[in-house]
Amino acid sequence: MDESVRILVVDDEAMIIVMIEDALRDAGYEVEVAHSGEEALSIIEQATELAGIVTDIQTGTGADGWEIGRQARRRSPVVAVVYMSGASAGEYAAEGVPGSVMIQKPFAPDQIVTGISTQLNKIASAPE
């Protein structure tokens, strides 16, 4: 990638964060991590160049993944959002932000990279 594209990864499980972080970095993305919903909202509020968010639905303390996606879209209507869940995927139609992606656990790290990359490509090629 020519320019740095920042992705926020939100999960309360350190091993999942490391797995996703490694896959996204290998794909050329700059990665920022949050270990809770509370930390994620703080990062979103301060971020100026956040292109995408990969968030678990169950994030530990603070906001859940649904709220993180909504807050990110309020801040930037074109931010890419990828949700991850093992148990909450059934709520996606009602809770997920439009144009987002749901990836069910367990997943391969490449599925996350594909999900975020596909969204970013759609956003980049959309007419202004």
Image: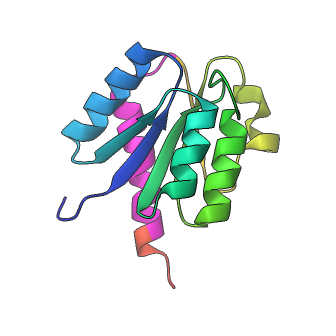
Residue 28 x, y percent position in the rendering: 21, 47
72 versus 104 height, above or below: below
Residue nearest the viewer, comparing 21 with 128: 21
Colour mapping: rainbow
Which residue extends farthest right? 94
Quarter of the image for residue 82 reads top right
Q: Which residues are magenta?
A: 106-123
Left or right placement of residue 58 versus residue 52 in this view: right
Count the marks.
0
Which residue extends farthest bottom? 128
Residue 16 x, y percent position in the rendering: 42, 19
Q: Is residue 111 magenta?
A: yes
Residue 31 x, y percent position in the rendering: 33, 42
Left or right placement of residue 113 versus residue 10 in this view: left
Residue nearest the viewer, comparing 59 with 92: 59
What residue is shown at x 44% (from left), y 43% (from top)? 8
120 versus 8 height, above or below: below
Q: Is residue 93 magenta?
A: no
Q: Is residue 81 visible?
A: no
Quarter of the image for residue 66 reads top right
Q: Is residue 31 visible?
A: yes
What residue is shown at x 39% (from left), y 62% (from top)? 121
101 versus 1 height, above or below: above
- Magenta span: helix, strand or loop, mainly? helix
What residue is shown at x 51% (from left), y 85% (from top)? 128
What residue is shown at x 19% (from left), y 58% (from top)? 1
Residue 70 x, y percent position in the rendering: 70, 51
Quarter of the image for residue 58 reads top right
